[in-house]
Image: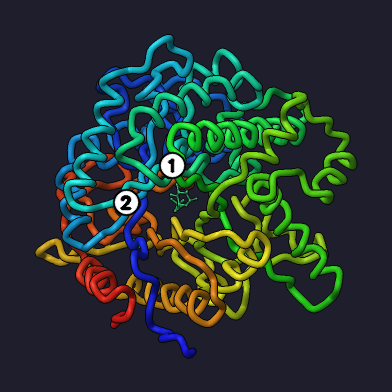
Amino acid sequence: MKNNINKLPEGFLWGGATAANQCEGGYLEGNKGLSTVDVIPIGKDRFPVGVGKLKMIECDENHYYPSHEAIDFYHHYKEDIALFAEMGFKCFRLSLSWARIFPNGDDAQPNEEGLKFYDDVFDECLKHGIEPLVTITHFDVPMNLVKTIGSWRSRKMVGHYERLCEVIFNRYKNKVKYWLTFNEINMLLHLPFIGAGLIFEEGENEEAIKYQAAHNQLIASAKATKIAHAINPEFKIGCMLAAGNTYANTSAPEDVWKSMEKDRENYFFIDVQSRGEYPCYAKKMLERMDINLEMEEEDEKLLKENTVDFISFSYYASRLTSADPKVNAGTEGNVFATLRNPYLKASEWGWQIDPLGLRITMNAMYDRYQKPLFIVENGLGAVDIQDDNGYVEDDYRIEYLREHIKAMKDAVNEDGIELMGYTPWGCIDLVSASTGEMKKRYGFIYVDKDNEGNGTLKRTKKKSFDWYKKVIASNGESLE
Ligand code: BG6
């Protein structure tokens, strides 16, 4: 039987994605505690803080911290969700701010005001027929846990995370079905403070700390999966990878080997979360690095018995590497090291645009895990210029999304991949995670706010808003 290559499955979850730390604002409102993201400034100190080299555990007067107000979703959520509904969203990906629910992370009781806020947000979604997809932690840890136990370097974090999960799974069991345990879990290797609240002291073995933190998160993720399925067997739990396959710079086998190693650095996490055990290459790598992970007796069984139901991922770009250190030298210091691929164009922030790379990445992951996939981030960060009426003609964004949706449809219809949904990143403009800028915009909805924090916060539909509305209404058939 021939497939209609234009069709996507019935019930495909079209939508958009955000994260609490980049859109909520209200950073101390409703009894919320301070989060890691709240002490990450914009400007030259952002990267050193983000990688855990510059210790910033409080806010000071000399910096501007974009998360404090962000786009003030905290007060605008009704208006924003109504706009998502107008676009026809079936699904809205958002994250919970841990410190809104447990202000210090280790409080005896959760903060009712924080829990109530998310009740209201979910109710608003459900009122519009929008399925919430909830990331339990997206780049945010209560600062108190950083100060008292060093965040994810400590096994004690698992207990605090478990507690959070018990509370939210019970509270929202009739409102939320889809959960992701950790956003871009592999990010902790690249941005350890942003990804896992890690701050390093001079002379520490950073690799050992990162992999221990990774182990602790992997255990926390397995425990969350276990608790979730016990509380509501209907829950679907996903892992989340910052994906994008790494190509070899040349056909030299050394380059090909290097690209495989690079991919394994990322797959390592999902191999554990999806297959339930440390892969042999990771065990050998840790041995070579002389890293002895502290594990508990129950860990192996726990990982084996509590694998995820689906694999979610972000995809913005593919990557390119070489075995020759001289060739690779220029890539150091980037979040994801990559060479410039001469066959691809790049965004204004240098992210290389590769729609076919999405199909390649999806195939690689589906071959590896054989579990349903979910694209929970994709999109183009660009400078948008408003005309006199505030309208943005973002044809470049439409073009990017159109080509990626085509590639995604090919992966489904030509390659047979099971795909649950597509939630492009920053469906409404929000703060950039890597740079802290507002100028790097992804949204279908423009938010009047600049890098310095000025602006009315007014929301305005962009050209892509109506385009995406048609895409959703036609279940992906109409992309023009
Ligand atoms: C992913 C994150 O890394 O990419 C998001 O999950 C982030 O939090 C997104 O915002 C886009 O990156 P950036 O740096 O352009 O905001």
Residue 369 position within the rendered picture, expressed as x and y whole percent measured from the top left: 65, 59
Q: In the rendering, which numbered label is found on residue 135?
A: 1
Residue 432 position within the rendered picture, expressed as x and y whole percent measured from the top left: 40, 48
| Viewer-nearest residue: 353 or 328 | 353
For disc 1, does the CB lie below 8 Å from ligand 1? Answer: no
Taking the spot 45% from the left edge, 25% from the top edge, the residue there is: 166
Q: Label 2 belongs to which residue?
A: 92
Taking the spot 48% from the left edge, 21% from the top edge, the residue there is: 163
Q: Quadrant of residue 399?
A: bottom left
Q: Is residue 184 left or right of residue 391?
A: right
Disc 1, SS = strand
Q: Quadrant of residue 251?
A: bottom right
Q: Amino acid at mark 2?
A: Phe
Residue 393 seen in this snapshot: no
Q: Is residue 214 left or right of residue 79?
A: right
Q: Amino acid at mark 1?
A: Thr
Q: Earlier in the sequence, mark 1 or mark 2?
A: 2
Residue 182 position within the rendered picture, expressed as x and y whole percent measured from the top left: 52, 40
| Viewer-nearest residue: 153 or 67 | 153
Taking the spot 36% from the left edge, 49% from the top edge, the residue there is: 93
Q: How many marks?
A: 2
State the residue lying farthest toward the left: 389
Residue 22 position within the rendered picture, expressed as x and y whole percent measured from the top left: 36, 41
For disc 2, does the CB lie below 8 Å from ligand 1? Answer: no
In this view, 37 is above or below 103: below
Question: Around disc 1, counting alpha carbons within 10 Å, would you say few (fewer than 14), some (14 to 19), or many (20 or more)?
Answer: many
Disc 2, SS = strand
In this view, 224 is above or below 249: above
